[in-house]
Amino acid sequence: MPPAAATWGYGVHMTAAQLIWSEELLGYNFGPGHPMAPLRLELTMDLVRSLGLLQAPGLVVAEAEAVDEDLLAAVHEPQYLAAVRAGATGVADPGRGIGTVDNPLFAAMHRASALIAGASVAGARAVWTGAAKRAVNVAGGLHHAMAGTASGFCIYNDCALAIRWLLDQGAQRVLYIDIDAHHGDGVEAAFWDDPRVVTISVHQSGQTLFPGTGFAQDFGGPAAQGSAINLPLPPDVSDGPWLRAIEAVVGPVVADFAPQVIVSQHGADSHWRDPLTQMDISVDAQRAAAALIAGYAEEHSQGRWLATGGGGYDVAATVPRVWTHLVALVAGVDLSAETPTPASWREAIEARGLGPAPTTMGERAVGEQRAWVDGYDPADAVDRAIMATRNKVFPARGLEPMTAG
């Protein structure tokens, strides 16, 4: 049963939601000491189970299956696919990012990557066909993978593959929202000149963080001006300004674009404890951002929403809570920040030497945030970043930078 602090947000009439999961997804494993530890997923699913979320009415757990080979070839170059398969046999190709420090070789490289991609495609299929209203793949969000190279711990780009599947089924308006601390460069590149897909990435500025891209002036190819939207933020951005930035850019665009489906990436590496980034975002704010996106889907895409995981390298205290909140939102469960974490889950973390484990599902109140309509402050670095993006992108979309939204 769910914890006492949780309530079922949609009741018995809730349209089904899907959690795409298989223990085999833990096979995406670059080896000991690598930041992209499968333990992140293991601890997340342990927390999901311990909180009773798998018993949420209408939530279906669907098995992951490897992505279709033809679809894989529609996003990734044949030579790259061959290099990944060779990598699984121990043959490195550093020029294609295979067998590098970021992406070391492992035997299940092709199979595990294809399963993660297949899980996100399955989620896209579920929401597009009506089998589910919402879907989530916490193993997904491998947004750096390019058509011909691995990058940033990402082999196959599951988000791009899910979006490509939707386009192949006739979707004309797909919105991709990326709130990982790192720029969602691979997804952006895949649809750079395709007006059917709008990509929005809210991230720590590439001036201070990998991959060094994603600036306001990068806003789409000749046939899709204003379809790539980048909001690079200062490294010390905190909860209120971060949420204000998301609302100020995503809100007007989603209302104008009226997407048929929203695909989102929820990297937990914007958290203040993350060892690879320098942002100051809490678990509570990350949950609030996911709730915003859920609301956008309800209002503008008939609820059709595919959510994925992504980065996040504070393995025990942060990632499991952020993604458990994400699963809860997809399942229609109002899981409060005050909900205690189960004692059995905390004990398992501490037994692994990863403690002390957090005792609640949140950590600090987000507090009041200034709405964009309350005015632009040129002395505020976050406001300047918001305005730079709005000034560059909004006119291309027929929106007024100062007043829209």
Image: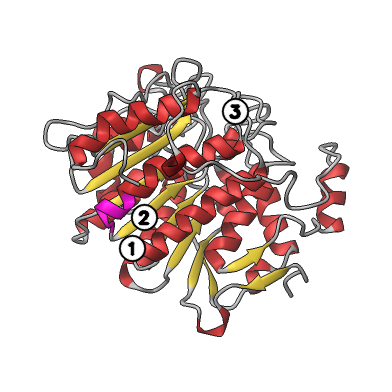
Applied colour scheme: secondary structure
Q: Disc 2 on helix, strand or loop?
A: strand
Residue at the disc numbered 3: 279
Q: Position of residue 115 (x, y in %)?
A: 45, 50
Q: Is residue 376 above or below residue 44?
A: above
Given the image, on which type of amino acid does mark 1 rest?
Ser
Q: Earlier in the sequence, mark 1 or mark 3?
A: 3
Asked if residue 255 lies in the magenta stretch, the reply is yes
Q: Position of residue 206 (x, y in %)?
A: 44, 20
What span is in magenta? 254-259
Residues at circles 2 and 1 in contact by the CB criterion of under 8 Å: yes
Given the image, on which type of amino acid does mark 2 rest?
Ile
Residue 168 horizontal side relative to residue 349, left or right: left
Residue 281 horizontal side relative to residue 69, left or right: right
Asked if residue 132 lies in the magenta stretch, the reply is no
Q: Residue at x 25, y 50 (%)?
A: 70
Q: Local crowd at mark 2 within 10 Å, few (<14), some, or many (≥20)?
A: many
Kindly give the residue lying farthest to the bottom in the view shown: 12
What's the distance in space between the residues labelled 2 and 3, CA to CA? Answer: 25 Å
Res 183 quadrant in image: top left
Which label number is shown at residue 301? 1
Given the image, on which type of amino acid does mark 3 rest?
Met
